[in-house]
Image (spheres, rainbow, N blue to C red):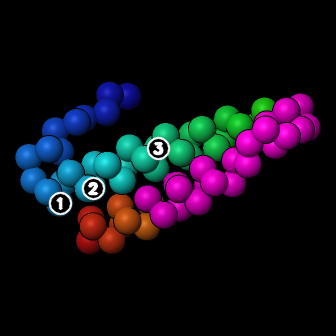
Amino acid sequence: MRLKIDFLKQEEKFFLGLAEIIFRFAFITFLVLFVLDYLFPGFVTNWFNPIWLLFAAIISGIVYIQIET
């Protein structure tokens, strides 16, 4: 899947695209770290709290929905 970066034309599309990129990165990274920590307990959570990525995904998802509508 290719990510289109043609959102620099309008300010509203810029924030919409930025929120989409942040959401995808944070959510996919959270899922990967969650699976790693499930398979190897403490492998991720001893060094990093992946809940911060989930918070970033939730906030950017809310921003994405609010700008889109």
Question: Does the CB distance between marks 1 and 3 fall below 8 Å?
Answer: no
Q: Residues within 10 Å of mark 3 (few under 14, many from 20)?
A: some
Where residue 22 sits in the image (x, y, percent)?
43, 47
Where residue 35 sits in the image (x, y, percent)?
76, 37
Residue bearing the label numbered 2: 16
Q: Secondary structure at mark 3?
A: helix
Q: Which residue is outermost to the top?
A: 2
Q: CA distance from mark 1 to mark 2?
A: 6 Å
Please tell me whether residue 50 belongs to the stretch shown in magenta. Answer: yes
Q: Secondary structure at mark 1?
A: helix
Start-end of magenta stretch: 39-60
User: For residue 12, which numbered disc appears in the image?
Assistant: 1
Question: Does the CB distance between marks 3 and 2 fall below 8 Å?
Answer: no
Q: CA distance from mark 1 to mark 3?
A: 19 Å
Q: Quadrant of residue 11?
A: bottom left
- Residue 53 left/right relative to 36: left
Question: Does the CB distance between marks 1 and 2 fall below 8 Å?
Answer: yes
Residue in the image at 91% along x and 37% along y: 41
User: For residue 35, which numbered disc appears in the image?
Assistant: none
